[in-house]
Image: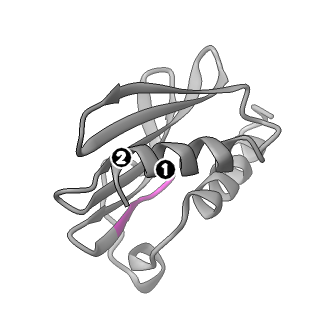
Amino acid sequence: MNADEFEQDVLRVAGEWAYLRSAETVDKTDYAIKLRLTVDTECFVQVYANVEKSILSFALVLNRARIYGRDNEGGEWHRHPYGDPEGHDDSPEGRKAVALATFLEEAQAILEEEGLL
C-alpha cells in the first residue's frame, strides 16, 4: 500500500465514527503520511505511517500530550497504555496487531470513561 492508498483508507474509516469531527492530512511525502482526526479543539487521534520503513502509529492526544497509543515498527506492535502513555506494554494484548477501526473503538471507550464524549 502506498501513501495515497493509506490516506484514502484512513479518511474512509474516520468517516464512519460519529465522535470524529474532521479528518485532515497534516503532512505527506511519497512514503510517509501523518493525519489528524479531530475530536474537539483539545483532542485528536494522530495516525502516522511510513510505508517504506513499515512503521504505523496511532495516538490519542489530549491537551498536546499522548494519553494512549499503539505502534508497529517493522512488524512488531506495542501499546502505550492509558494511564502510562510513556510506558511500553509488550504483553500479548499490547503486542496484538490492531486496525485503525479497533484503535478508534479503544479511543472512544477512553474518552467516554473520561467524560469527554
SS for callout 2: helix
Q: How many marks?
A: 2
**In front of the other: 24 or 83:** 24
* Image height of 58 relative to 99, above or below: above
The secondary structure type at the circle numbered 1 is loop
Q: Nearer the viewer, residue 36 or 110?
A: 36
The crowding category of the residue bearing disc 2, from other C-alpha atoms within 10 Å (few below 14, some 14 to 19, many at least 20), is some
**Residue 95 location, x and y as percent?**
38, 77
Reply above or below: 106 against 107: below
- Image point (58%, 18%), residue name: 42
Disc 2 from disc 1: Cα separation: 32 Å
Residue topped by disc 2: 3
The residue located at (23%, 45%) in the rendering is: 31
Cβ atoms under marks 2 and 1 closer than 8 Å: no
In the drawing, does residue 20 fall left or right of residue 88?
A: right
Residue 18: percent from left, percent from top? 82, 38
Residue at (69, 57) in percent of width and height: 105
- Magenta region, residue range: 78-83
Which quarter of the image is occupied by the C terminus?
Answer: top right
Q: Is residue 81 part of the magenta span, yes or no?
A: yes
Residue 113 vs residue 29, the one in the foreground:
29
Which residue carries the number 1 mark?
Answer: 83
What mark, if any, has residue 9 been given in the picture? none
Q: Amino acid at mark 1?
A: Gly
* For residue 26, above or below residue 95: above
User: Quick one: label 2 or label 1, which is nearer the N terminus?
Assistant: 2
The answer to if 68 sits in the magenta stretch is no
